[in-house]
Amino acid sequence: MVWDGMVACDLFLAGLGAGAFLLAIVAGWSEGGSKKIRLIGSIVGPVAVAAGALVLMIDARAGLESPGRFFGLIANLASPMAWGVICLTCFIVVSVTSLVLQLAKKEVPRVLDILGIVCAASVATYTGVLLGYSMSYPLWNLAVLPFLFVFSAALTGFSFVSVIAYFVARSELKALKFLPKVETALPLFVGVFLILLLIVCAMSGGKAGQEAAVTTIQGVLTGSYALVFWLGVVVCGIVLPLVAGIMRFMSKSYEIGSMSVIGYLGALVGGFAMRYVIVVAAVSVTMAPIF
Amino acid sequence: MQRTETKTDKRPFMLVDVSLCIGCHACVNACKFENELGIKQFNTWIETWDAGEYPHVVRANVSHLCNHCDDAPCLAVCPTGATYRSDDGLVLVDQQKCIGCKYCMTACPFSVRWLNDLGEVEKCTFCANRTSQGLLPACVGNCPTHSRLFGDLNDPESEVAKKVAKVQVESMLPELNIATNTCYTGLAQTSALLKSSSVLHAGRVAVKLEDMEG
């Protein structure tokens, strides 16, 4: 294990911010404009993404002690981390511009919204690509991880905005007719891609890759990460939001009850747990512990 | 053996003959003295285990160090360019540019990179300070059995090039196909034997036997 909970934290916050801002934009297009939800998502978006970047900077201790070195962060444009820095910067610029326009009671131009969607998608995708680029960890599969993280980003971001809206803008939340469908679909997508991730990991080629993959999956399903995985990732992150989503979808006039709140909170706990397990439980092909 | 051309037309290369290594750790200690490494800092280490089944058991000793890959995963992901390729083709780290993001450490399939006390990444340099002056890397110069050979692969008269021409040369993780410049002979043969003990990593248990048996 090279990276730890700090990086998991960054991936979680970046995803959450991207998802929150995405909901803000889409909610803004709905009838009536959902002004409060739009504002909540537009605040959460840049704040969470910036907080995630800050966590990453704190984790990069040599840079933290010589901050001038951070200016070199895009020196190698072949590095996914450099792409990430560009994505995060664009995201923060676009989302803060949108926020300022809203606070100034001005119309947010459609083109800025579309740019916002592109930036949010890039930030969420980058969190998966960052890990996927390493060939040392069979669990970090470049073909699956970006999809898993994008769906999870949407789930956590939407849930975070929704749980705030439940208390401060419940009528607006109820009025968003697409939400119950999305709340049901997102946990399903997360579940499907999580299973897919474990399957492609198990199919890793090469003797070393196979050994590392088997050790990883055992650690996740039955070993030292089993509790976090089953309770955190599966129960909190997938089952609770799925049940809450289905209950809301089946109810008359899409009622939002306490189960919805439990689903939202579960999605947040599960979203973090999933990134934590994926970062920390991955075993390298050398299987060597770091001194 | 094809390797990418370098600016100086030299190709620094190390060949480790696994069957000759007796696990004496002279290389590890010479490296520590040369590079002034702390007690938990290793640019090279030996992994040791018992291989085979009684009565045909051998002690396997496998040297680990930076592979100075032509297609180096660490070099590709370093965002700041702190990891760079020297004119000789070595993969080196400019600590003055390193922010300590550890991305290179996750990318390196051989786990040879580590963090120093300042949070900067360090690793084996093939003793660039010595080899640029025509000396051998400290580990090679101190290997009593010539298990480690070092030289210019592009010079057919070098000791290492001659041995490379004679023996079966392997990479540590050949499936990655990243053209390593630390290569082995006898590694696949040793690795194929049943592991009958835990793997020791510089004298301490790194992978337990029961974990390998699943």
Image (cartoon, helix red, strand yellow):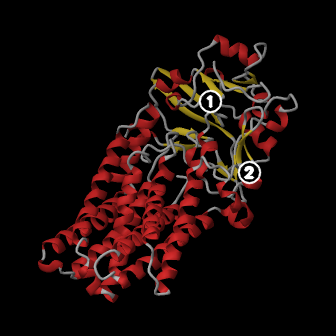
How far from the left and from the top, in percent, is residue A131? Answer: 49, 51
Location of residue B134 by image quarter: top right
> In the rendered structure, which disc, 1 or 2, sits on the residue that comes first in sequence?
2
Residue found 73% across the figure and 35% down from its top: B90
User: B97 or B127: which is nearer to us?
Assistant: B97
Location of residue B19 by image quarter: top right
Check residue B38 in the rendering and tell me which mark sits there, or answer none. 2
The answer for which chain carries disc 1 is: B
- Answer few, some or many: residues within 10 Å of disc 1's Cα (few below 14, many 20 plus, some between 14 and 19): many
Which amino acid, mark 1?
A: Thr
Find numbered disc 2 in the image and state the secondary structure of the residue it sits on: loop
Residue beneath label 1, please?
B180
Q: Is residue A280 visible?
A: no
The answer for which chain carries disc 2 is: B
Location of residue B180 by image quarter: top right
Find numbered disc 1 in the image and state the secondary structure of the residue it sits on: loop
Q: Count of labels shown?
A: 2
